[in-house]
Structures are given as structure tokens and as C-alpha cells.
Image (cartoon, rainbow, N blue to C red):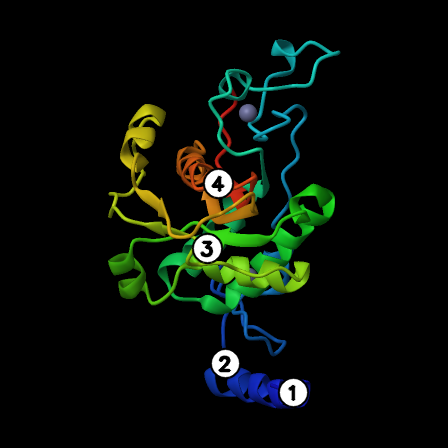
Amino acid sequence: MSRLVRWVFDSLASVLFAARCRLCQEMLTTASRVPICPSCLGRVRPLELLVSCHRCQRPLSLASQSPDTVPLCGPCRQEETDFDRLRAFGAYDGELRQLIVLLKYSRVRSLAGPLGGWLALVVKENPGLADVDALVPVPLYRGRQRARGYNQAELLARELARELGRPVETRWLVRIKDTPSQTGLTPTQREENVRGAFAARAKLDRKRILLVDDVCTTGATLNACARTVKRAGAGSVQAVTLARVIQEI
Ligand SMILES: [Zn+2]
Ligand SMILES: [Zn+2]
């Protein structure tokens, strides 16, 4: 769509539907496909952690760290993490959490634009995340994706891929088990829940992969994905998510 056509379309849409911000209900004064006002978008802040695990960015307490070693969390120190690096844009609370919920459950697909832009900021801060052959969104189970109409992780991956000039591969990794929601489960239960849930559908001969998802809670899902693609031959697996749940350990 040309910019002019898009502008006309957006202006018409804003007049016809007199949209309100989906977060604060203020009238939207500028034409945009994204139904969120600039001040709500502006309240979303990137993660600021004093000390975090070098590998998975899990927040660590200052006291537990010795100043001359690379900070690593327990699971990463014990090599229980299958991805090589994980970074997130922000904490899973406040406006960011509400925006992710809108994208995921209220079909506000246009939010993938700004949210994907924030993923691109994470890559800008961590340029190593761009050293990949392809972006692989964390897959949904087929039936679940059909019911929702899309996979939010894939929408985000497509936005980020455009910035990075890398392809999105949705067939390399599939979800073969319709696992129940991870909400309310303990870290161990989460690991059990996603065990055997994924399968690689390609020979990933030394491919360098960037997994993309909306939220990371304990990292169990990303870890299961990383393990699966590494068993299929992937050379490196990094991961980027929009938000992470902050539990200091
Ligand atoms: Zn607002
Ligand atoms: Zn870690």
C-alpha cells in the first residue's frame, strides 16, 4: 500500500470509527492503525536490571555475584540452558503486559508493528542476536493457531525479520502436543508440560537460529524449543522475547 493510500485509509478509519485508546479510553487524535495513544505507548519502558545472567538475562541479586566473574544464574551455570543467549525487551507488567494481551487474545494484530519495533531495539543493543540464518517463531499447536487465526510470535518475528533482512522459517519447528497453558504451574511443572511438545521438521545442519516469542516466564518453553532444534543439528540458538516475567533469584 502506498503511503498516500494508507494515509487516506487511516484518516477515513479514524473518522468513521472515532477510535479510542484501547488502554486508557482517551479519544485518539492522530490517524493510526494502532489503537493505542502515544502516551500509553510512551509509558512502556525497556528492562533495566542492575545485575542479570549473562546468558539468559534472569535478574540476579547483587549480593550473590562476585565482581570478577561473568554473572550467571544457577541453571546456566549448571549448563541446564539449551539456548546460547536470551534477551527480552521489557518486564511483563503494566502497559507492555496489556499490549501483549491485546495482541494475543483480542485480535489487535496491528500491534505487531510497534511491538516488533521494540524487538528490533533489543537486537540493536545486542547485535550478536542478528548473526543468524533465520528467525523461528515459537509455534502454536495447529488447532490453537487455527482458532486464534494467527500465531502472535510469528507476527512479531515477521516484523523483526523485515528489520534484520533475515527470513522467517515457520516449518523448521512445529508444536506436536497441545500442551495446556503454563499459567499457574511451578517451574518444574512447566518443564514437564512442554517436554516432547516440539519437533523439528527440517535438517538444521549448523543453522544459526533466533527464536522469537512474546513472553518468557521461566524459559521452559524456549529451552524445549532450543533443545529440539539443536538435536536436529542447529549450530546456535539465541532467543528474543518482548517481555519477561521478573522473579529475582
Ligand atoms: Zn492511552
Ligand atoms: Zn541464566
The mark nearer the N terminus, 3 or 2, is: 2
Find the distance from the CA under tag 3 to the CA under tag 2. Answer: 29 Å
Find the distance from the CA under tag 2 to the CA under tag 4. Answer: 52 Å
What element does badge 2 sit on? loop
Find the distance from the CA under tag 4 to the CA under tag 3. Answer: 23 Å
x 62%, y 59%: residue: 166
x 56%, y 39%: residue: 235
Image spot of residue 147 (x, y percent): 27, 64
The mark nearer the N terminus, 1 or 3, is: 1
The mark nearer the N terminus, 4 or 3, is: 3
- Residue 2, numbered circle: 1
In the displayed structure, 235 sits above or below 20; it is above
Residue named by callout 2:
18
x 55%, y 19%: residue: 73
Find the distance from the CA under tag 1 to the CA under tag 4. Answer: 42 Å
- Mark toward the viewer: 3 or 2: 3
